[in-house]
Image (cartoon, helix red, strand yellow):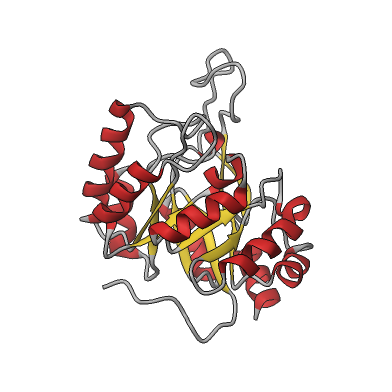
Amino acid sequence: MIPAPNTSRSILLEVLVESVESARAAVTGGADRLEVCQNLFEGGTTPSAGLVTALHRTVPLPLHVMIRPRGGDFCYSEEEFEVMRQDLRILKGLGASGVVLGLLNPNGTVDTVRTAELIAMARPLSVTFHRAIDMTRDVFEALEALAELGVDRVLTSGGEASVIEGAEVIAEMVRRAGNRIGVMPGGGIRERNVERVLRITGAREIHVSGSKSISSRMEFRNPRVAMGRELRAPEFSHNGVDADRVVAYRRLLA
């Protein structure tokens, strides 16, 4: 069984991971919970069943898994929504303790009908509405709709590029949310600004990546071929969680 978060700490630290290696680093650093996804270059998509299975077997923390069928916007076709249904059903059975999702209508409002369907499928797991809320026409309108749906928390940068620009908005979201729904700042949080963000917003949970670049173990490297498009991530390095950075966050939040 996955243990509950450490409620003895005043601020819950959620760390974003996309590999077993990163998850172990996050645990070493003192994370309370993991958000699990893949394809961070596109903002995160649904992780594989193999990854979630491996994490459930090896990592002693709650796993909140992303349910997002592709990068880009959050207005999904019926075919994409069916993929989300199937992914949720599978990952729920593989040890996830929560799901992270976000669906919008073309007019920039929350797709409450399909969000409600996924929430019902996900229960009794925890449900987070991710930064799709930052792409809505009105974050306060969206927050109210999500509170009425019974979503447990929203992950947000306050509708701005980072939490620094959106801190005052997040503070108002926290005020309006009360005890109905959690508001978790995320997006652009660094060791140098995390205390300021928490001081301004009054949030009780925080979402960070704490990442570093990890060099490839490949010795032979073919410079003529790349596996990505023209705008692409480095071929011979990848991002992973830096345990020392998580330790630094943990100390700042203690």
The picture quadrant where one finds residue 178 is bottom right
Q: Position of residue 159 (x, y in %)?
A: 66, 46
> Relative to 242, is 214 above or below?
above
Q: Position of residue 20 (x, y in %)?
A: 41, 54
The answer to whether any part of residue 47 appears in the image is no
Q: Residue at x 53, y 60 (%)?
A: 15
Indicate left or right for 103 with 186 as reference: left
Residue pictured at 30% horizontal, 61% vertical: 56
Viewer-proximal residue among 44 and 149: 149
Q: Which of 208/100 is in front? A: 100
Q: Position of residue 142 (x, y in %)?
A: 54, 49
Which of 79 and 60 lies nearest the eye of the viewer? 79
Residue found at x 46% / y 66%: 33
For the N terminus, the image quarter is bottom left
- Residue 4: x and y, percent? 38, 77
| Up/down of 94 relative to 161, above or below | below
In the picture, the quarter occupied by the C terminus is bottom right
Let me know if residue 114 appears in the view. Answer: yes
